[in-house]
Each structure stands twice: as C-alpha cells, then as structure tokens.
Amino acid sequence: MKDKRIYGMFGPKIKAMRMEHGLKQRQLAELLETDMPMYSKMELGARRVRRDQVPQLAKE
C-alpha cells in the first residue's frame, strides 16, 4: 500500500515538471520509450515509473 502513495506523489511532480518545460505527454512517452496511455497512468499515479526511466526524466 505504501508504494501506491509514493506513485501518487511522484505523478503530479512529473506532470508539473513536464508543463513547466512546455512538453507534451507524447514527447515524454517517446523519451521514456513507452506509449501515451502508460505515461498518462504514471502522471495519475496509477502506474509506477521504472527505475531506469528516472534518470531520463531528470535530464528533461
């Protein structure tokens, strides 16, 4: 259960950073080598970001 709270906190942060940089979900989905529905779920906190995707997000 604790993991879901962490996902829920990480998702809004990803969204805020994406919007701050003027990027679209599609662009970050491509960067993370995933599809748009999966990326959207990451922002909503319904799916977790894989450990190997975190450095890619940090670069953006």
Image: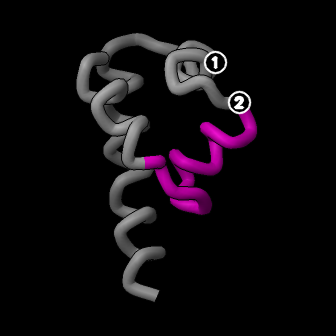
Residue picked out by circle 1: 26
Which of disc 2 and disc 1 is earlier in sequence?
A: 1
Q: Nearer the viewer, residue 44 or 30?
A: 30
Q: Is residue 45 above or below residue 28?
A: below
Residue 17, magenta (yes or no): no
In-front residue for pair 33/14: 33
State if disc 2 and disc 1 touch (CB < 8 Å): yes
Q: Position of 25 compared to 9: left or right? A: right
Q: Which residue is mark 2?
A: 36
**Residue drawn 33% across and 38% down?**
54
Compared with residue 23, is residue 2 higher up or lower down, i.e. above or below?
below
Q: Which residues are magenta?
A: 36-50
- Judging from the image, what secondary structure is the residue with disc 1 in? helix
In terms of depth relative to the viewer, which is nearer, 53 or 22?
A: 53
Report how far apart the C-alphas of labels 1 and 2 lie in the structure.
Answer: 6 Å
Q: Position of residue 43 (x, y in %)?
A: 52, 46
User: Residue drawn at (34%, 28%), measured in percent from left and top?
Assistant: 57
Q: Return the mark for residue 3.
A: none
> Residue 11 appears at what percent x and percent y?
43, 50
Mark 2, Cα crowd under 10 Å, few <14 / some 14-19 / many 20+, is: some
Task: Report the amino acid beneath label 2.
Answer: Met
Report the colour scheme.
one colour
**What is the x, y in percent for residue 28?**
51, 21
**Along the line of sight, the residue nearer the viewer: 14 or 47:** 47
Residue at the front extreme, as displayed = 52
Q: Neighbour class for label 1 at 10 Å: few (<14), some, many (≥20)?
A: some
Q: Quadrant of residue 10?
A: bottom left
Seen at 60% across and 24% down, the residue is 33
